[in-house]
Structures are given as structure tokens and as C-alpha cells.
Amino acid sequence: MQNAGGRMAASEGTEPWQISTLPNQLRVVTTPIPTAQSASVNVFVGVGSRAEELRVNGVSHFMEHMLFKGTARRPNATIIAGQVEGAGGVLNAYTTKELTCYWNQVPYEMLSLAMDVVADMVQNSLLEPVEVERERTVVQQEIRRTHDQPGAWVGELLSRAVYGDQPIGRSIAGTLEIVDGISRQDMRDHLDTWYVPNNMVLSVAGNVTHEQVLELAHKCWGKAASREVPCVSAAAPDLGAQRLQVDERDLAQANLAIGMRGIRREDPDRFALTILTNVLGRGMSSRLFREVREKRGLAYSVGASTARYTDTGAFSVSAGVSPENAVKAVKVIMAELKKLVDRPVGKAELTKARDYAAGSFRLGLESSMALAQRAGENLLVVKKIEPVQTVVDGLRGVTAADVQRVAAKIFRPDNLALAAVGPTLDRRKLEAALRL
């Protein structure tokens, strides 16, 4: 269907969102919420740390910082932030392994300003050399902070253990040494390569109309030109060579993370894995919480989580325990994983997990920001937006046999890795405990 102004509508139907594509291939998705008091503006760029060469690992994240530092129209960070905050709004950004997102949220009558600010930031950054050097130090401090937080650092180590020495296994922020060598030209090359309309999605949700957003999108982004972007290499299929990553430190607590390769973003088993994760380690009634904390008192915090990417994924269990209980905690966790492989989940427990998953998914979409984020990320990464009801039906349709089958698929002796940060950690005993 042809819209006014030469914009192409990419979909129609009964879903709450509307999608159009500008002539330069920028995809625009709008989720109108007539009762909302806000408008959430999100620009997604299809580049993250897994697209980087080792020499510039961290450049996507560094770039995320730099785009707040000034344009010709808004010469410094104070002016950029001040315009959005002065309108009663907030702004920020984040980088993942597969994308970078710049967002702001404003009272809905300030939509035009919000759209203009983010478009100016993303398209017209000055990348002033003095700002590059100043922000380099800030990024390095962020890396140091992650290293100094054992709970965060064990996650970095687990990524290395699960994925090994390949882009998807490296830190999103890079290392101190690599960041020190990233140049302004590296940033300019990064922008020129990846920040093009056909590799971006503009997602807006709130008290707005699709026509209103399209008009502003055409004004703010219409002159940008698309180019072909490089392909990102697929992840190597096997675990890393160093499946045990241990950082011994003089701490009061041992931070543990057990990981394994999971499933990709669109895998048909994604709903079953969500239910499995809830049964095992989501909430105070989960198996790990009951067994590790309530019954044995081994940990204050324990839980399970998943990460899914275009072609791979990860499943992990994390816990903070007393150092003397580290090996015992690993054994207890492994025993709980084995139970899911050996025996089907009971009817009552399965029903609760399905209801929890479907309910928490719905409740997580209550805000304009959540709706804009979900629509934009889905459209960018998988090129479609899965209807909410489809997800709910998928979660509620999971059977005990599905959970057991996925558990057997993921919880395998050849698919186990472990990271630990803490004092007096016995590597040999930890590795011996990591058995199904």
C-alpha cells in the first residue's frame, strides 16, 4: 500500500502497531496508546559487539556514549540532555551484543522535540577529539566498575566460558587496553558502515498517531542514504576451550555462574525454555530458590536466566554463596538440572509456571517504553513483531514433555561451563561438581 509522501506501508491488520518503510528503507513502527501521557522514541541500530573485530572490541558501546556529546545544532552534552529533560523527559541508550538503542521518553506533546533530538544525535555527532579523549576515560571507568562488581564480573567470565574467543563471547564494553586504542577514525568508520537507514528501526509508542510519527520521521530522517551493511559471522557451535573461568579474590562471598549453550531467538522451543527457566529459577517458589536457599541455606540469591540471539543462545544459573559452600552449591544446582531431565514436571507446578510466564509477559508491556522497545527490537532483529497473543498462547501451550525434552537438549555433560569469583576456590573440586 502506498502512503502519502511516498512512504510504503509494510503491514496492516488488527495489531496495535503500524509499520511503514520510508523511501530510504528506514523502518518506522508506531504503537498508539491514546490514553498515555507519554511518547517513547527509540532508534535501534543493527550493530553490537558481536559485529566488531577484536582490534576495536567495544567500539559500538564507545560510540553509544559519544553520540550524546554534541552536534552542530546542539554543541555539547548539556544542551542535548537539557532539551529533553527541560521538556520533562528522560533520555539514555544501551548496547548489546547485537544492537544499539538510543531512546528518550517525553510528555506526548513534546514528540516533535524528542524525534528531532535523537535524530540529530544519531546522524550529526561531531565526535570532537577532546570529547573522544574525555569519554574514553569514562568508558574505561565503566569497565573497571564491572570488574570490581563480582556479580557482574562473573557474568563476563561466563560469557567467555560458554562462547570462547569469538566476538559473541567478548565483552560488550571491550577491555581497557583495546578501548585505549580506539580512534576517532574507528568511530567514524563504524558510523559510516552501520548507521544507515536500512540497518535501523524507529519505534515510537504512546499518545501518538502513525501519521504524526511518519511525518516527523520523513522530516528528520528522509535525507539519509542507505548502503549495504556487512554480514555478521555466525557463532561457532561449540563451547569455549576454557570452560572453567575462575577469578580468585579476597571476598566474603563466592559468586557462581553455571552456563551452557541455549537456543536461538526464533527457535520453536523458546516457549518451553521460558517455562523451564521459571520452574527452575524464577521467583521464590522456584525449585532452585526452595532447594538452595530455603531448604539448605546455601545462598541468599539464586536464579536462572536465558539469553537468545539470532543464531545461538545461552542458559545460566547464578548464585552467591559462602566460599566454603561453593562446591556443595554447584552439586545441588546440578542435581536440580538433572531432575528436569529425568522426570516430567508435575501438573500443578507446570500450570503455575505457565501462568507466571504469561502473566509476567503481559505485565511487562504496560508502559509505552516497553511496547516501543519490544516492537523496535523485534522488527530490527527478526524483521517482524510477534503478536502478544501468539506469545501467550505459546507459553500456555507448553507441555511437561516439552520441558523435559528441552532440558535434555540443553543440560548435557558436553554443554557445561562454569565461572566463579571469590576466595579460596578449588578449581579441581568445582570442575568435578559440574557433572550431571
Image (tube, rainbow, N blue to C red):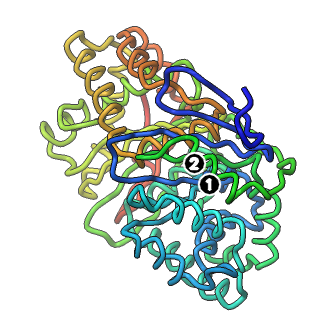
x, y (%) of residue 127? 71, 80
Q: Residue at x 39, y 68 (%)?
A: 149
Asked where in the image residue 107 lies, by quadrant, the reply is bottom left
Asked where in the image residue 420 lies, by quadrant, the reply is bottom left
x, y (%) of residue 338? 37, 23
**Considering only vertical position in the picture, is 48 above or below 237?**
below
**Considering only vertical position in the picture, is 62 above or below 429?**
below
Q: Which residue is nearer to you in this view: 131 or 388?
A: 388
x, y (%) of residue 75? 63, 85
Residue farthest to the bottom? 130
Q: Secondary structure at mark 1?
A: helix
Q: Residues within 10 Å of mark 2 (few under 14, many from 20)?
A: many
Q: Which mark is residue 274?
A: none
Q: Residue at x 44, y 74 (%)?
A: 145
Q: Quadrant of the C terminus?
A: top left
Give the residue number, with chain letter if any, for mark 2: 213
Q: Residue at x 36, y 46 (%)?
A: 318
Give the residue number, with chain letter if any, for mark 1: 216
- Contact between labelled residues 1 and 2, with CB atoms less than 8 Å apart: yes
